[in-house]
Image (tube, grey):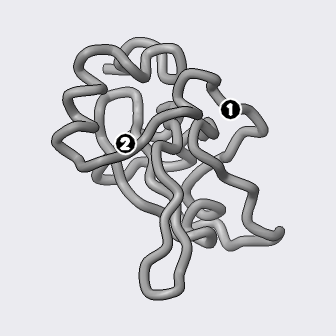
Amino acid sequence: MPLREPTAPPPVVEVGTLAVAARDSAVCRAGEVGVCYEVYEVGGRSGYSFLFQDGGYDGFSPGDAVRFLDVQPVRDAAASTYAFRNVSQLRRDYERGLFQSALGPPAR
């Protein structure tokens, strides 16, 4: 499947913003729900980290978010207060169901 090229400005993404994967990748399947758990800046570039239903996670530049995700105009209230520390803590928080209100049960 070819990459979708951005045709509009990148969507507004905040911690707790929901998205649906537009295509399969190494961390998620097309149609899988994701939630932003971190908005970051590295070397003057902004990006968003998303956690998906089955526990995969990855970072996206604003352009990649447009290409790979269907960002929804919805934020999950519980996930919007998440304070990312590190991926080990993220995994533990996922496993204990902290993101279930945003993601629902695993897709697989």
Residue located 52% across and 86% down the image: 44
The percent coordinates of residue 22 (x first, y second) are 57, 47
Quadrant the C terminus occupies: top left
Task: Identify whether 3 is placed above or below 69.
Answer: below
Task: Identify whether 67 is placed above or below 105.
Answer: below
Badge 2 crowding class, 10 Å Cα cut-off, few under 14, some 14 to 19, many 20 or more, is many
Task: Identify whether 31 is placed above or below 103.
Answer: below
Q: Left or right: where does residue 48 sit relative to residue 71?
A: left
Residue found farthest to the left: 88
**Is there CB contact under 8 Å for labels 2 and 1?**
no
The percent coordinates of residue 43 (x first, y second) are 44, 87
**Mark 2, mark 1: which one is toward the viewer?**
1
Residue found farthest to the right: 8
Residue located 59% across and 51% down the image: 69
Q: Which residue is mark 1?
A: 75
Q: Earlier in the sequence, mark 2 or mark 1?
A: 2
Toward which corner of the image does residue 8 lie, by quadrant?
Answer: bottom right
Q: Left or right: where does residue 69 sit relative to residue 87?
A: right
Residue found farthest to the bottom: 43
Q: In the image shown, does 28 or 50 lie closer to the viewer?
A: 50
**Element marked by disc 1:** strand
**Element marked by disc 2:** loop
Toward which corner of the image does residue 15 lie, by quadrant?
Answer: top right
Q: Left or right: where does residue 22 sit relative to residue 82?
A: right
Q: In the image shown, does 49 or 56 lie closer to the viewer?
A: 49
The percent coordinates of residue 106 (x first, y second) are 35, 18
User: For the residues marked 2 and 1, what is the alpha-carbon distance in whole angstroms?
Assistant: 20 Å
Mark 1: which amino acid? Arg
Task: Identify whether 42 is placed above or below 81.
Answer: below
Toward which corner of the image does residue 52 lie, by quadrant?
Answer: top left
Mark 2: which amino acid? Cys
Q: Which residue is mark 2?
A: 28
